[in-house]
Amino acid sequence: MKKKRNVYLAIILAFTFLMPTGVMAAEAPPANTAPQGLKEIAAAKAALLTGTYGATSVQYAMVDNGKIIASGEAGKNDAAGNIPLTSETMYGIGSTSKMFTTAAVMKLVDQGKINLDSPLVNYIAEFKMKDERYKQITPRMLLNHSSGLEGSSLANAFLFKDNDTYAHDTLLDQLAQQSLKADPGAYSVYSNDGFTLAEILVERVSGMDFTAYIHQEFTGPLGLKHTLTSQDNLDVSKMAALYAPGVPEQLPNETVNVIGTGGIYSTAEDLVKFAGLFTGEAKDILSPQAVNAMAQPEYKRGLWPQDADNSVDYGLGWDSVKLFPFSEYGIKALAKGGDTMMYHAELVVLPEQNLAAAVLSSGGSSSLNELLANELLLQVLQDKGTIKERKPAKSFGTPEKADMPEELTKYSGFYGATNQLIRIDVANGEINVTSPFAPGQSLGLPKLIYTKDGTFVSEDGTLKVAFVKEKNGRTYLWERQYASVPELGQLAVNLYSAEKLEANAITPDVEAAWKQRDGKSYFLVSEKYSSLAYFMTLPIYQITRTDSLPGYVMDKQITGPDSLMGKHAVPVTGSRDSAEFRFFTQAGSEYLETAGSLYLNGDQIKELYPGKKSSVTLRPTEQARWFSVPAQAAGKTMTVELPAQAAFAVYDAAGTCVNFSVVSGNNRVELPENGKIVFIGDPGKTFRIFLNS
């Protein structure tokens, strides 16, 4: 749910970066002790994020040898302007929380209480999975994303102003019903569950709840007075305000209830103080050996693309341990980003230079925050004379077309990554990428020309792709790119973005079962009334198949008449969140279950009673009841008498949420033609409904 602008820089599957549509002024940051040039640059670049690239507000800070040399804010907080942005305004830091989790594990390693390479079951006795390979998972594999866990069991993890611990408390139960998608250690692919499991590891070994542990061992000793978790008493007035496109109201606070994965709130100044763990200023908290271990190239332990300029190369916790563009200057740089639904964060640390920068935002993206952090750090390096001058933007140069060997046509076919399916045709020295659901219709991606080095390069020289048959026998689309964002710099991409999908033969009876589901939508029924899942767009999963690739639903293999699973093995991010899909019938209704979330077959949805008065009572097994808007009710005003701790949401025919009572505080709405309505609460709750013309 990120704000978008008009023009996108196309990248085949992995990334999109926002392009500008204009610049607006932002408030200048408060006076500080930074050199004048740095202060002006920081203010101007932050203004770009809020004025051009979709962020509502931005907060930044930079530290040099333990001293904050730049700190400021840009954008707006509350719409009325009554609550100013300050250095103490707190933001959700999303997955940057994983660095606190990693540090907590490493603290216990220092104390001899955890061995990174011992089986996890030695520490969490009740950890079990259907797949016996789970016994091979180690703490190291949780921290470098190579555990083989399916991905993200995040039911009820993202709630509005609600710190329910359900996602944390039920994770072990969820994992007990899951298999692994890969041998532990085979390859690193981003895994949120690995870090919630690491959070539980810290709790089991320390004997403390995670929030208490990080306050005792990190926020207290480091003086991080504005770093809290969703389990602390959060003062909403001190949080950065949240807004969404097309929604006039300020949103309630976003509460992330998987703390080790993404549930910490902080400030930019606190984060650069936390960075002292890695630059040497904060001594006696982690050993130098622990800090050094975190910064090692863990990604090399398993399947990974050949090294090239990149923004993602996993360490322990870190997204990157050799971040571009600092690698261009021979400078070691560590980075960790975080994106929740509404908040975005980036921490970049140059350990050998004793420098760090943090950028937090409401709206925007962590990738853009990273670019701002990079710009500030590069400016200081230049001011110090560490780098003499900035290197120009990189590209692969203008491609010179070469004769393509006929054998490369064998790479034509379908390629998949999580929830993504494309058709690639290799012919006449070019690559053509289309959607199998719109044959012949181009996806608008750049033209890719075969060159003499055996790769295909875009005409502007920023994108290079090739096909690689890896040692595991699988074929990957290898993508390298320099993505430039005007006035903010470049990000480098080096990854396998998709895997060639092989034919998956299914029996006639299995095909018949799936034929019945073609095109059907399944509606979310398991989330709490306060869940962000009901906000912005219709929370459904649609069965999307193509006759050109029988045996698949999107990228997922049909594994039986009632089951699906992504069987691709794409490292970095391509096979993240590859949960198994299970379909079952209960009390005459068909349901879909995946990663602990439950969806109801849309065929079971009834029309709302169009009369003046009616009521809906949630059944003993229900948390949500869906209705369609009948023609007789379209255009009428619906007023809902809500019970306590309950909500309703209404969606138009396009699936856009036109009213979610948790956000709007409004229990009245005009019903859209061909819309949908969901009533949400605990089983047994009764909603009284009134319709007026």
Image (cartoon, rainbow, N blue to C red):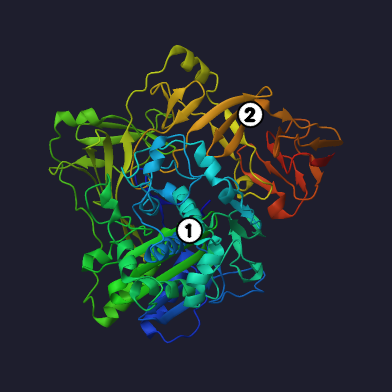
Kind of residue sitting beneath label 2: Gly
What is the quadrant of the C terminus in the image?
top right
Which of the two marks, 1 or 2, is nearer to us in this view? 1
- Picture coordinates of residue 446, whole percent (x, y): 31, 44
Q: Which residue is mark 1?
A: 205
Q: Which residue is mark 2?
A: 602
Q: CA distance from mark 1 to mark 2?
A: 45 Å
235 displayed left or right of 125: right
**Callout 2: SS:** helix
Using a 10 Å C-alpha cutoff, classify the residue at mark 2 as few (fewer than 14 neighbours), some (14 to 19) or many (20 or more).
many
Kind of residue sitting beneath label 1: Val
Q: Is residue 322 above or below residue 559?
A: below
Q: Is residue 596 above or below residue 193?
A: above
Residue 142 vs residue 330, the one in the foreground = 142
512 displayed left or right of 532: left
Question: Residue 113's quadrant in the figure?
Answer: bottom left
- Can residue 472 be seen? yes
- Picture coordinates of residue 497, whole percent (x, y): 33, 43
Number of marks present in the image shown: 2
Question: Residue 452's quadrant in the figure?
Answer: top left
Q: Are marks 1 and 2 in contact (CB under 8 Å)?
A: no
- Picture coordinates of residue 689, whole percent (x, y): 82, 40
Residue 498: which numbered mark, if any? none
Q: Residue at x 55, y 41 (%)?
A: 173
- Picture coordinates of residue 275, whole percent (x, y): 40, 72
As drawn, the residue found furthest toward the top would be 508
Q: Residue at x 52, y 66 (%)?
A: 213
Residue 488 vs residue 179, the one in the foreground = 179
- Can residue 692 be seen? no
